[in-house]
Image (cartoon, coloured by chain):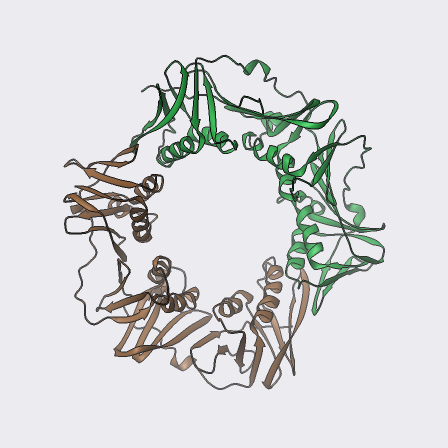
Chain colours: A green, B brown
């Protein structure tokens, strides 16, 4: 194999596929990037068996061939080459020579046959969405996904549900639910899949993310495929039924509070710096009255209270929450004001807008003041 | 005690003295900041017994008094207050109330008597230097100081030597020496002291650092005092004689090489990304010939070589160095070109300028190619 391409283009490609290279693995081949110059284009691929990324870069193929190279080492080498033409040449013993101006690097590659290529999947009609919208949806929901957890694999993923021209994304953990709805430009066949949280976070990082940049999404029984720019991401889906959240969502409330989002968020943050030091992991208390809401904590380390103007409908209420869970939800909302819907001090708080574009559900913490 | 000051002024003051608050200590009082409003001004002080920092902030003293408060907790509380007037009030049981707009925080302070004030030191004529110059000198030398090491406390410090109008700073570890000389505007009595590296790094962080901003330096037998802006830093000196480096410095050379600093630095960095993965901690090799220098490594992970144009006087030479030590020195030099003076593959390399404003000495690593 002998190929030549620009250092910047190659580096961008390597950084894209690196997102699918596991940091710890016992299979050395998974730590490799595949450089495939057997066809008309130069393709870079990485695959950790859960998520596979392939990206195409421009360059000239002087001699067709394929080689697998340690991905992070290769990335570091390309990153420290001058911004100039890079030539990669390898012989039939996988001795690889990388040349860029006066720099020459020799490394040993591995045969491409050992590499697990990403599955070739028949494509139907794609769902089309702007990269900006998809990045927003991911930022606004994935924070809720549980950490990798063998007990409940389903909770490490996120539901994507398509119904006509509506796309719904749902993420949840034991204490909260995050729901986002958007209208698509077209209608599509109904679809309900669970995507690993890792996949969503990685594609959010590699998409350029303009509102004019599109991403095409294909579904199969076991996989989801994202195609954008010159990159293809194939991810396994998580098998099983997503938790049915419909019975958890209610429109009843006893107290409705409209409040400035930044004021509330800053006040809660002020409580967090104290509660973070408290070994008892106490909640903060929201004391909702006519015209204002008092936020307070009573920790062994310090007492703190603050007051925020609100517009209240319904009953007064005293309720406690974990400050991080509450601020995570506020951070995901771009509106200036938010509206909270509450029933009593044991029932979840719903933060939602009138259009139904988002619903954040947060369980309260039991308080004994 | 009751005082009122602006949140921004108070936060700046707290962040300044926080540099003298130890992260781990068994003495809870050392984790405190002293707020002293017994005089005409509000003074904040922190003191870890090695370095003490006092800063004065403007504000009104409504009731004189003094209190010690957990420094990091207090810093976090002030940081999360709105940018408005802050009132701090404490009673004779050290119950402290911090009020800022609608925020009220109650914490328990400690009596100021328990606090170790920074020593009051008689001041002679100060040495005056610009903050920018001092910050530069610190940046250009402290990287050489050994990590905190009980075996040789002297090597955790840096020599400051004043001879007439010359100020020399010297830092060293087992493998290298960094020397900087500057001309002062005036002449001062001769002086030779060893300052803890930590002190220098902390004052570099808190000085605003303009070329017009001055710092006044006072010396006593056991302390050095830096006065700048509204801040006083008192540091213990390290006792003992600094290692005599005069016999290590030589002007003899067999090979003199002038080279572009960025080219050399980038080439060495390219070697570093490979050598960092090499368990043998191998050196890079500099192969100095007429007109060019080859930089190469021969690691089990990869071989790499690069070539840089140089102007050479004297003999050809093949010599090995630790890449990090070499690049640390290059990073501390602001010149476009650097000149290396070498004798043979076992003798140190001197990087110095014609004016004698800097000398960086680096020991080579034995190479068996």
Q: Which residue is drawn at 53% across and 23% down?
A: A353
Name the image quarter holding the N terminus of chain A: bottom right
The one nearer the camera, B227 or B103, is B103
Q: Residue at x 43, y 81 (%)?
A: B356
Check the image and report above or below for A193 versus B78: above
Q: In which quarter of the image is residue B149?
A: bottom left
Percent of width and height locating residue B44: 24, 50
Q: Quadrant of residue B29?
A: top left
Check the image and report above or below for A2 versus A33: below
Q: Which residue is drawn at 76% across and 26% down?
A: A221
Q: Is B211 on the left-hand or right-hand side of A2?
A: left
Q: Which residue is drawn at 60% across and 70% down?
A: B263
Is residue A1 something that shows in the picture?
A: no
Percent of width and height locating residue B69: 25, 42
Is residue B61 something that shows in the picture?
A: yes
Percent of width and height locating residue A197: 62, 33
Percent of width and height locating residue A211: 65, 39
Q: Is B281 on the left-hand or right-hand side of A51?
A: left
Q: In which quarter of the image is residue B272?
A: bottom right
Check the image and report above or below for A31 versus B137: above
The one nearer the camera, A229 or B161, is A229
Q: Is B314 on the left-hand or right-hand side of A126?
A: left
């Amino acid at each position: 194999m002998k190929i030549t391409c620009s250092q910047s283009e190659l580096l961008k490609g390597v950084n894209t596929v690196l997102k699918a290279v596991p940091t710890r693995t016992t299979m050395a081949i998974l730590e490799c990037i595949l450089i495939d110059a057997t066809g008309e284009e130069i393709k870079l691929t990485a695959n950790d068996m859960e998520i596979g990324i392939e990206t195409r870069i421009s360059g000239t193929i002087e001699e067709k061939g394929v080689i697998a190279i340690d991905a992070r080492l290769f990335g570091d080498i390309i990153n420290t080459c001058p911004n100039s033409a890079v030539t990669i040449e390898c012989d039939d013993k996988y001795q690889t020579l990388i040349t860029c101006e006066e720099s020459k690097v020799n490394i040993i590659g591995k045969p491409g046959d050992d590499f697990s290529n990403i599955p070739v999947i028949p494509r139907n009609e794609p769902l089309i969405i702007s990269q900006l919208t998809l990045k927003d949806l991911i930022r606004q929901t994935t924070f809720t996904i549980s950490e990798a957890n063998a007990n409940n694999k389903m909770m490490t993923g996120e539901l994507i549900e398509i119904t006509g021209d509506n796309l719904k994304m749902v993420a949840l953990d034991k204490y909260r639910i995050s729901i986002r709805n958007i209208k698509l430009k077209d209608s599509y066949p109904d679809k309900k899949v669970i995507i690993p949280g890792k996949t969503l976070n990685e594609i959010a990082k590699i998409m350029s993310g303009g509102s004019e940049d599109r991403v095409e999404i294909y579904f199969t029984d076991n996989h989801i495929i994202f195609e954008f720019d010159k990159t293809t991401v194939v991810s396994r889906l998580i098998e099983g039924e997503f938790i049915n959240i419909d019975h958890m969502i209610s429109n009843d409330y006893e107290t409705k509070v409209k409040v400035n989002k930044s004021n509330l968020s800053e006040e809660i943050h002020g409580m967090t710096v104290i509660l973070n030091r408290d070994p008892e992991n106490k909640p903060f208390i929201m004391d909702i009255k006519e015209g204002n809401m008092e936020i307070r904590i009573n920790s062994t380390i310090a007492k703190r209270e603050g007051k925020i103007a609100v517009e209240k409908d319904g009953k007064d209420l005293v309720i406690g929450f974990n400050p991080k869970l509450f601020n995570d939800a506020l951070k995901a909302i771009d509106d200036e004001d938010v509206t909270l819907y509450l029933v009593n001090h044991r029932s979840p708080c719903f933060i939602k807008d009138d259009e139904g574009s988002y619903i954040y559900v947060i369980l309260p913490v039991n308080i004994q003041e």
